[in-house]
Amino acid sequence: MDLTELWEIAEQERQSAKPTQIKCCVAAGCVSANSQLVKQRLDAAVKTSGLENQVQVCGVGCLGLCSQAPLVRVDTLNPREKHSILYQQVTPDKTTAIIAALAGKETTQLPQADLTHPFFTKQLPIVLENTGKIDPERIQAYIAHDGYRALGHVLREMTPTQVVDAIARSGLRGRGGAGYPTGLKWATVAKARGDTPKGSRKYVICNADEGDPGAFMDRSVLESDPHRVIEGMIIAAYAVGANHGYIYIRAEYPLATQRLQIAIDQAQQLGLLGSRIFDSPFDFRIDIRVGAGAYVCGEETALMASIEGKRGVPHPRPPYPAEKGLWGFPTLINNVETFANVPWIIRHGADAFASIGTEKSKGTKVFSLTGNVRNLGLIEVPMGTTLRQIVEEMGGGVAQGTAKAIQTGGASGGCIPASAFDTPVDYESLNQLGSMMGSGGMIVMDETINMVEIAKFFMEFCMDESCGKCIPCRVGTVQLYQLLTKIRAGEASMADLELLEELSDMVKHTSLCGLGQSAPNPVFSTLRYFRDEYLALIDQGNKK
Ligand SMILES: Cc1cc2nc3c(=O)[nH]c(=O)nc-3n(C[C@H](O)[C@H](O)[C@H](O)COP(=O)(O)O)c2cc1C
Ligand code: SF4
């Protein structure tokens, strides 16, 4: 494969596009609402209506507004009548009406989403630029949307050091939770020596474990645009000097795993993975490793132990994976969304990426917006967008009453009260509020939600997911859960509340890994903003 062949594939794909495209979401949310049958029926209806030459039906990734699944988007590409319609809640029996409308026949009006709503207009797709637009199972579709162009450029025009510098200048920070500067991590792995008698050995790992409650961003990216993540990984491998990569994905994501395998096979067939990529001296291959869904296996040291075939438990750092990772060799480990940003940064330039976002948090962030909000789904917004814009404008507010809080950052995060909704979403601001960016789950809560119940829910999650290696987390999370249960039941005293605070502090400071260290965060944030709810329950207990 050389660049000319890549252009040819892209051109052929563009030429073969029909004037009207019907895009049926075949990502997990819509598939679970029967979208595969919807797609079959649309295909059949196009044939029986004799529209095959004008209309193309294709399966695409997430169309965003998951609460209205199954979703079908109709794009008319003809410049004179160019327009788009997003049909929602499309059941198989409604497909003939969609095709009849295309054929200009009078039909019953089908429910449509308002594409001028802030849910759509306030988004800035970088990671999701192809999501809902291309068929994730066809590499030609990715190539026609500039896919693998960044890789071709990097391998022909840039040295590994220039690639690392570009990522550093872009300001990209890891999207897996902690926000560590990606360029700095790449530079550390690039400098590390992975000496063996047969030459240097280093690894690149994509962390697709995504275990946070309410989070489905990485799954959607992999189901919708798997080549983008693969391209990001190949570029990273070239930059740090690795020839072998792993994608670690949980077994609960069978569709994403299947699409990744299809994408890897297709890339190999075209010579974009394997030996002498783009006719350069660079070789790289990727293998998938499926994890059993333990939350702790998302922690990088536990993840690597799991790939090595050992029990997935964390070990202390240093040494960090960048110096001593998989099988003791220098290893770059990044999140799905981190890799998915890379091709865009190379194509558009580090400065273009750095011009988006806030001073210290550059680019965009993908969030899964869930909970008691009207518009649920997948969104990508520039860093610095306020929580209010996300919840009230894009999410359309809560269905009943008013919003009370938003939970961000998954099990390690915290609950932010509605009074702080004017805060811009970036790493530092969320930390200051006692929460964190995390991987991108956002759960909106209305006034009916009891915040002690929420703290109890997240503590139960951490208690169940604790690997048990260290005592503060293994025993502490159980005791914290028991205390929260007692408070919630209205059977606790002020001494129990003091013990809750003391124990939370101890678990935070003495646990071995991030799971235990952050397990008390939901307790801290609910105590900080909703202490009255704890006190009311204790007061209730005193009156019994
Ligand atoms: C308990 C626990 C679970 C984690 N789960 C994930 C995960 O599912 N995905 C992820 O990318 N990072 C997860 N992380 C963070 C990883 O350890 C690691 O920092 C991250 O993959 C680095 O990628 P980044 O620099 O691109 O963010 C988890 C950390 C902890 C402590
Ligand atoms: S903090 Fe919890 S999850 Fe982490 S090593 Fe200790 S017991 Fe295991």
Image: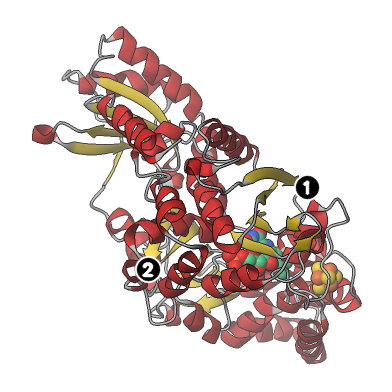
| Residue 252 seen in the figure | no
Query: Relative to the observer, which residue lies in front, 27 or 325?
Result: 325
> Helix, strand, or loop for circle 1?
loop
- Tell me if 18 is positioned left or right of 433 in this view: left
Q: Which badge, 2 or 1, comes first in the chain's sequence?
A: 1
Query: Relative to the observer, which residue lies in front, 283 or 517?
Result: 283
Residue type of the residue flagged with mark 1: Ala
Quarter of the rendering containing residue 101: top left
* Name of the residue lying farthest toward the left: 80
Quarter of the rendering containing residue 69: top left
The tag on residue 376 is: none
Quarter of the rendering containing residue 379: bottom left
| Vertical comparison of 344 with 191: above or below | above
The residue singled out by tag 1 in the image is 292
| Vertical comparison of 13 with 93: above or below | below
| Vertical comparison of 233 with 80: above or below | below
Query: Relative to the observer, which residue lies in front, 480 or 251?
Result: 251
Going 74% across and 70% down the picture, which residue do you hit? 459
The residue singled out by tag 2 in the image is 350
Residue type of the residue flagged with mark 2: Ala
> Helix, strand, or loop for circle 2?
helix
Residue 343 position within the rendered picture, expressed as x and y whole percent measured from the top left: 43, 54
| Residue 18 seen in the figure | yes
- Tell me if 515 is positioned left or right of 348 in this view: right
| Tag nearer the camera, 2 or 1 | 2
Residue 175 position within the rendered picture, expressed as x and y whole percent measured from the top left: 54, 65
